[in-house]
Each structure stands twice: as C-alpha cells, then as structure tokens.
Image (cartoon, rainbow, N blue to C red):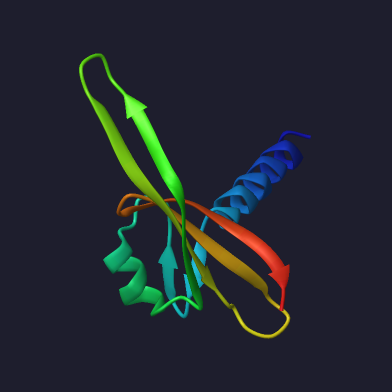
C-alpha cells in the first residue's frame, strides 16, 4: 500500500513539473529562465505579444514590469506552448491547443 502511494505522488509531481516546463530539442525551459536563455534554447517564437503591465507596491516604492507572452509551435500533433515573462524572467509556461 505504501509503495502505491509513493508511486502515485511521484507521478503527480512529474506531471506538474512537465506542465510548467517546455522542451526545445534536448534543452529545458523552466520558470526563472531569462529571455536570452529562452532564445538560445528555442530560437525565435512564432508569435510575441505584450499583454500588459504588472504594478507592485512596496511600502515606499512602486515598480512596473512588462508582461509578455511568446508562443512556440511544438510540431504536428503536439500542444502549442506559451511562455509568459514578467520583465526578463519566465514566470509560467502554458500549454495550448494541438497543432
């Protein structure tokens, strides 16, 4: 019984890890990567879009970061991936529709 629970937990963790990452050839893009790192690993996206500005307030300062999305085609029959940047860093990777 314990082995079954451990196996299930590991499978769920692997699924979550894959959902927030993107493979480009043998290289992996994950949250925290920079724009230049993503370009180096995956090349130019098929589409770029500035979707807004995120403002954060601290006690004495206010900062704004550009939110940008880059879309990548993963090939015939595979899910399209969208990489979301806040400023220069990847914050999330979403899967889209199949191509």
Q: Which quadrant would the N terminus be assigned to in this image?
A: top right
Outermost right residue: 1
Q: Where is residue 45 in the image (x, y as percent from the top left)?
A: 46, 75
Measured from the top left, where is residue 91 in percent x and y? 43, 48
Residue at 40 percent of width and 38 percent of height: 54
Residue lying at the far bottom of the rendered structure: 76
Instruction: Name the foreground residue: 52 vs 87.
Output: 52
Where on the picture, by quarter, is residue 43? bottom left
The answer to which quarter of the image holds residue 6 is: top right
Quarter-of-image position of residue 8:
top right
* Viewer-closest of 79 and 66: 66
As drawn, is 40 to the left or to the right of 67?
left
Q: In which quarter of the image is the C terminus?
A: bottom right
Residue at 37%, 33% in the rendered image: 55
Q: Nearer the viewer, residue 36 or 55?
A: 55
Q: Where is residue 21 in the image (x, y as percent from the top left)?
A: 51, 59
Horizontal side of 30 relative to 99 (left or right) equals left
Residue found farthest to the top: 59
Looking at the picture, does residue 93 appear above or below residue 22? above
Q: Residue at x 43, y 67 (%)?
A: 28
Residue at 51 percent across and 78 percent down: it is 46
Find residue 75 and report its horizontal and vertical position in percent: 63, 83
């Amino acid at each position: 019984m314990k082995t079954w629970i451990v196996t299930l937990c590991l499978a769920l963790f692997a699924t979550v890890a894959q959902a927030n990452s993107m493979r480009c050839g043998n290289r992996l893009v994950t949250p925290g990567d920079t724009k230049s790192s993503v370009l180096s690993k995956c090349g130019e996206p098929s589409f770029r879009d500035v979707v807004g500005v995120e403002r954060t307030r601290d006690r004495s300062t206010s900062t704004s970061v550009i939110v940008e999305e880059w879309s990548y085609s993963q090939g015939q029959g595979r899910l399209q991936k969208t990489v979301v940047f806040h400023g220069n860093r990847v914050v999330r990777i979403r899967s889209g529709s199949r191509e």
